[in-house]
Image (tube, grey):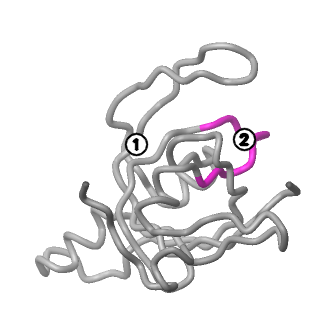
Amino acid sequence: MGKVIVKIKLTNYSDLVLRRLKLARGKPRAVAVNALVDTGATRLYLKPSVIKKLGLVRSDTVRSQTTNGEAIRYKYEPVELELMGRRENFDVIEVPENVPNLLGQVPLEVLDFVVDSKSQRLIPNPAHGGEQMTEEY
């Protein structure tokens, strides 16, 4: 399978909440970036430059297993991730600037996308007729 890269829109979730509560007037901070689809990764991983543009606040640390061994990564408050008309909120894990933004398996499952390895692209899960669905069993 080759590389699958997608364009994702990210919005600071705290900004969205403050706007909904009418406690903020400005537009929520948002960016559109490329992300490498990585089914071997678990979460949403972003570069420090993207995290800074979104104004995210560090919330915790997590242990991460990488190809170079174990690492401690910073966890940040959630963003709203939008991809191909679907959106959901996800915590962010920081990766080094020289690593691509990564879209891992959990966001793919929640948004109900799968990798079509033949055409090397991301597609709506055909098992669900192309409609987003969650599984509860």
Q: Residues within 10 Å of mark 1 (few under 14, many from 20)?
A: many
The numbered disc on residue 23 is: none
Identify the magenta region: 95-103
Mark 1: which amino acid?
Tyr
Which secondary structure type mostly characterizes the magenta part of the structure?
loop
Instruction: Pinpoint residue 52: horizontal percent, then vertical percent.
Output: 54, 52
Viewer-side residue, 31 vs 120: 120
Q: Is residue 93 left or right of residue 1?
A: left
Tell me the CA gap for discs 1 and 2: 16 Å
Which label's residue is closer to the chain start, 1 or 2? 1
The amino acid type, in three-letter code, at marker 2 is Glu
Indicate yes or no whether the magenta region holds residue 10: no
Residue found 72% across the figure and 41% down from its top: 97
Residue at numbered disc 1: 76
Residue 108 image position (x, y, % from top left)? 52, 60
Q: Residue at x 40, y 42 (%)?
A: 76
In the image, which disc is placed on residue 97?
2
Q: Judge from the rendering whether residue 3 lies leftward or rightward of residue 128; answer left or right.
A: right
Vertical relation: 119 (above or below) 96: below
Q: Residue at x 45, y 78 (%)?
A: 128
Q: Position of residue 15 (x, y in %)?
A: 30, 68
